Amino acid sequence: MSDGWNPEQYNRYASERELPFWDLVGLLRPVSSCRVADLGCGDGRLSAELGFRVGAHSVLGVDASTAMLKAATHWTDERVHFERGDIGSWQRPGEFDVIVANASLQWVGQHEAVLGRWAGSLRTGGQLAVQVPANADHPAHRIAAELAGELIEDAPEDQVARNVLAPERYAEILDDLGFVAQHVRLQVYVHHLDSTRDVVEWMKGTSLTRFKQPFGEARWAQFVDRYRERLLEELGDRAPYVYPFKRILMWGQLA
């Protein structure tokens, strides 16, 4: 059984998904010849581009998905490397100048402790830049959690809704961890999709992956069909469809 992640499905909306990534990178202050870690690197394409953009002498991408890391081998070179790991427990004390985590922190809990480990992995003056989705109240996410709860005994919880904190709480955490400069904001990205049905394809690349293993391949297809029906009932079968997506962007720099 696969881990549920599919690089091709994820990248169907690559241009929309990378908008917050580059907004996040835009918060970084220049640093020469830095060492960068990209936590939750996915297929590695943005990791490699990030390294080029900030002039890094080395980039380490970390992800838990075997499928994504297999795709990331395309971007491996003498400067860019990837490894499999749990970003929730990941730490490399004092090794990095910049740590980026784009749309990955929401998959793990205990954000105060996790951000503490990441902060401890920075060198003096190091920068942390993190983006987390905050869209769990949108019908696309709510219906998925409700339907899975109806169909699966001990269904996986809606991790985003459970794990993601309020923006102001992240500001407090960054301050507690010694980030003397910080920027935290909630931003709404407006995505213009061809139709409401495209929301299903979007979700198949991310949030719905957590249900693939509990269902198995055959029941997974049935689940997606029922999810589509219920989503269209609530949102309507519209073309085009405006998909508003809330995200929290945070950046901090140590003294």
Image: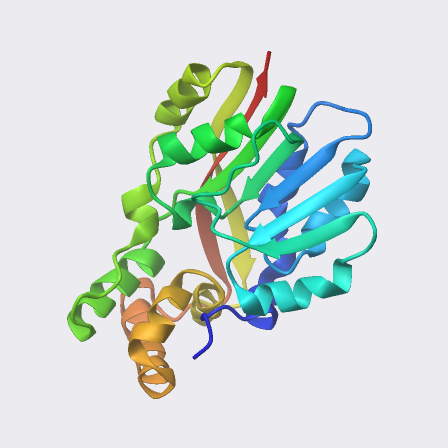
Residue 124 quadrant = top right
Give how far across and how far down residue 183 sits, in percent.
Answer: 53, 21
Residue positioned 43% across, 69% down in the render: 200
Give how far across and how far down residue 43 sits, in percent.
Answer: 64, 60
- Number of callouts in the render? 0
In this view, 240 is above or below 25: below
The front one of 238 and 17 is 17
Which colour style is shown?
rainbow
Give how far across and how far down residue 224 sits, in percent.
Answer: 35, 77
In this view, 190 is above or below 3: above
Residue positioned 33% across, 38% down in the render: 110
- Apparent side of residue 11 relative to residue 59 in the rendered image (left or right): left
The front one of 6 and 221 is 6
- Apparent side of residue 160 relative to residue 54 in the rendered image (left or right): left
Residue 20 quadrant = top right
Residue 157 quadrant = bottom left
Give how far across and how far down residue 126 sits, in percent.
Answer: 63, 23
In the displayed orientation, state which residue is furthest to the bottom: 218
- Report if residue 228 is visible in the image: no
- In which quadrant is the C terminus drawn? top right
- Report if residue 113 is visible in the image: yes
Residue positioned 64% across, 31% down in the render: 95
- In which quadrant is the N terminus drawn? bottom left
